[in-house]
Amino acid sequence: MKIIRIYVSLVEALSEWAGKVAMWLSSVLVVLICFDVLARYLFGISYVSVFELEWHIFALLFLLGASYSLKYDRHVRVDIFYSQFSEKQKAWVNLLGCLLFLIPFCLIVIEASVPYFLTSLNLNEASNDQGGLPARYIIKGMIIVGFALLFLQGTSLIMRSLVVIFNKKLFNQ
């Protein structure tokens, strides 16, 4: 149990950190969009790099926020039946959902993203637009990071579910 407790604590601390980064990035995104709108409509100036940066930050919000959302059980789910389940039934749904859907999906996305990232890195890929962002491989690499975080949080949820199913206590509650 001690190893499980340490693993779950570390993974959930990582997810918490990713959620805090996403929170700050959302504030940065709001400021960036305000700047973009003011520059465009008040001064008639538009920057391709600012527009691309908005999309990159928006992608990071989802990539980093996914593990945080899973940690706090705030992800999308059809709650018609789930909300009526006992804790043990919820643990079974979470366990099976992670094992059958979440973990395989994360592994597929990570496996597909690695060559995508490496090709971009080897080419030192940059934006095709004049004045666009350099180093496009950074955002492509963040796909791997985001899904790795989600994978780890999924394994943490599996462990938490198994603890509930077998009537054990993970933390002193």
Image: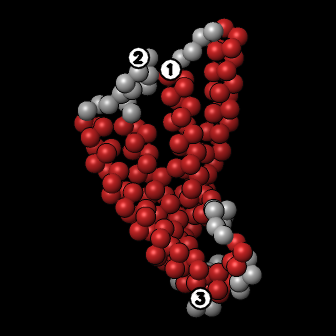
Q: Nearer the viewer, residue 12 or 114?
A: 114
Secondary structure of residue under mark 3 = helix
Q: In the rendered image, which residue does mark 3 sit on?
A: 165
Q: Marks 1 and 2: CB-CB under 8 Å?
A: yes
Secondary structure of residue under mark 1 = helix
* Percent position of residue 161, x then y: 58, 80
Q: Is residue 142 above or below residue 103?
A: above
Q: Is residue 33 above or below residue 114?
A: above
Q: In the rendered image, which residue does mark 1 sit on?
A: 48
* Percent position of residue 42, x then y: 70, 10
Q: How far apart are the two marked residues, 3 and 2, measured between alpha carbons?
A: 56 Å
Question: Is residue 70 visible in the rendered structure shown here?
Answer: yes
Q: Specify whether 117 is left or right of 106.
A: left
Question: Is residue 169 visible in the rendered structure shown here?
Answer: no
Q: Is residue 173 above or below residue 26?
A: below
Q: Give the mark, 3 or 1, whose residue is nearer the N terminus.
A: 1
Q: Marks 3 and 1: CB-CB under 8 Å?
A: no
Q: Give the mark, 1 or 2, whose residue is nearer the N terminus.
A: 1
Q: Residues within 10 Å of mark 2 (few under 14, many from 20)?
A: few
Q: Give the mark, 3 or 2, whose residue is nearer the N terminus.
A: 2
Q: Looking at the rendered structure, which numbered label has been put on residue 130? A: 2
Residue type at mark 2 is Gln
